[in-house]
Structures are given as C-alpha cells and as structure tokens.
Image (cartoon, rainbow, N blue to C red):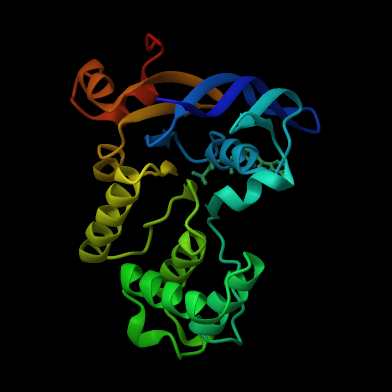
Amino acid sequence: MSEVVRIHEVDRLFGKKSVIKNISMNIGEGEIFGILGPSGSGKTTLIKLIAGIDKCSKGEVLVYGTEMPDFTVLTKIGYMGQSDALYADLTGFDNLSFFGSLYNLKGKELKNRIQEVAEIVGLEEALNKQVNHYSGGMKKRLSLAISILHKPTLLILDEPTVGIDPVLRKQIWKQFMDMKEQGTTIIITTHIMEEAEKCERIGLIREGELIALDTTERLISKSETGKIEDLYFKNEVSL
Ligand SMILES: Nc1ncnc2c1ncn2[C@@H]1O[C@H](COP(=O)(O)OP(=O)(O)OP(=O)(O)O)[C@@H](O)[C@H]1O
C-alpha cells in the first residue's frame, strides 16, 4: 500500500497554546482512516494541516510526497469542513457549477457530474432550490457533493454525516466504500461510534496527543467494554 499522508513529529501552536503535540502517523492509499477524540482535542486542527488549509509550527506534513501546504496537490484533495462554505443566494446547482468551474469542469462533463453527485447525496429534487431554503442536513449534503465533485483521490471529511438521517448516512457510507474500492483514501473525523467502526484504522487524539493508533478491530478489543470511546478515559493505551 503506497503512502498518501505522512505526518512526522508535528506540533501546531496557537500563540503559546499547543494544540497538536508531536504527532507522527502515516495513512496509506485506499484506507478509510478515522480520527477520533473528545471535543476540542485537535481533530479539526490536524486534518486542516493535512488538507493544506493550515501549516504546522514544527515537523512536517507530506501529502503524495509533497510538503503541505502546496497548491499543486490541492486538486487531488476533497475537503469538507464543519461549517458550510456555500453561497446561500444561489441554487444547489449553481453552487456545484461554481465549485466545478474552479476545478476546470465545464459543459456536459460538469452537468453530468453534478447529476451524479446530487444522486449520491440525495439532492436531485432540490438542485434548483436556493440554498437559503435548504435544511441543515441538506446543506451538509451539498457540501459533501461539492467535496467529491472533482473526483479527489484523497477525501478529508470533518464530521460529514452530523445532521444526516440514518438512511441517507447508510447511502453515503456505501459511496465512501465504493470510492475506497476505486482507490480513494478517506480521512474522517467523527463522534459517531457506529461510523468509527466502519473505518479500517483509527487514530485516537486526546488534548492534542495521539494516544492510540491501531486497526479498529484491535482498538475495540483493547477497550474493556468493547466501545472505542472508553479508551479516551484510560491513562495508558499501548500504541
Ligand atoms: N485558530 C485558532 N486559534 C486559537 N485556538 C484555536 C484555533 N483553532 C482551534 N483552536 C483551539 O484548538 C483546540 C482544538 O480545536 P479543534 O477544533 O481542532 O478540536 P476538535 O477536536 O476538532 O473539536 P470538535 O470535536 O469540537 O470539533 C481547541 O481548544 C480550540 O479552541
């Protein structure tokens, strides 16, 4: 399995506050990798470093062998953050058209791809509605559609299915699995344990430190209750 992400002895400080502390880990091609941790533990900060939205204070973050942030790698990355970056006055279709044009998609190719991603997230019927008439879950689904529009080979998702009902969540996860089969690497932060269990490996973060990194199966067996979240509370988790 070739390496897609390499994080080596990374720190991120905001002022004097250290939010990411000496984290090292690698993520391989086609992996579904989960980042878990309590609120405020540094998950978003870490994936922003991988996505090239932010820069580490120490150490190095390499994506496809290139130190991040780097503009040339960005076309290979799809990123969906927690807050929506949508144009509320435009329709769903126009939002997708706009973001598609940033990736040089145009004409029939763009139209077909919009249709495809709208189907994946179940928004076909709402494409001509203005986004300010969308529900929270619909906005989330549109953001997800935008993040996969240009067929990224590395997809980075910050709590992508919060506010999405279980039926659609299942459908979206099926799509993640299909993308994985095609070789897409997926990094996902989540608080939903059912979702974490679908990841192949998990990095557990607490107060900016990587306290465990293992296959999901082994992490479950390490927790006394069979619940991964219980590992947050343990003082020692063998890495
Ligand atoms: N730009 C910033 N300036 C200062 N502090 C920041 C900044 N961004 C994040 N932080 C701090 O870094 C810590 C980690 O935040 P982060 O958003 O990475 O946590 P998280 O694990 O993603 O939380 P949640 O699960 O609630 O989304 C928090 O204490 C937060 O206040």
Total marks shown come to 0
Residue at left offset 57%, top offset 48%: 76
Q: Is residue 15 in view from this perspective? A: yes
Coordinates of residue 132 in the picture (x, y in percent): 53, 85
Coordinates of residue 25 in the picture (x, y in percent): 51, 21
Picture quadrant where residue 184 is located? top left
Picture quadrant where residue 45 is located? top right
Residue at left offset 31%, top offset 37%: 199
Residue at left offset 40%, top offset 74%: 138
Coordinates of residue 97 in the picture (x, y in percent): 56, 78
Instruction: Locate residue 221 relative to residue 104 in the image: left or right.
Output: left
Note whether 4 is above or below 8 in the view shown: below
Picture quadrant where residue 114 is located? bottom left
Quadrant of ligand 1 in image: top right
Query: In this view of the protein, which residue sits in the foreground, 116 or 121?
Result: 116
Q: Is residue 53 in view from this perspective? A: no
Residue at left offset 38%, top offset 58%: 162
Coordinates of residue 29 in the picture (x, y in percent): 43, 33
Residue lying furthest right:
15
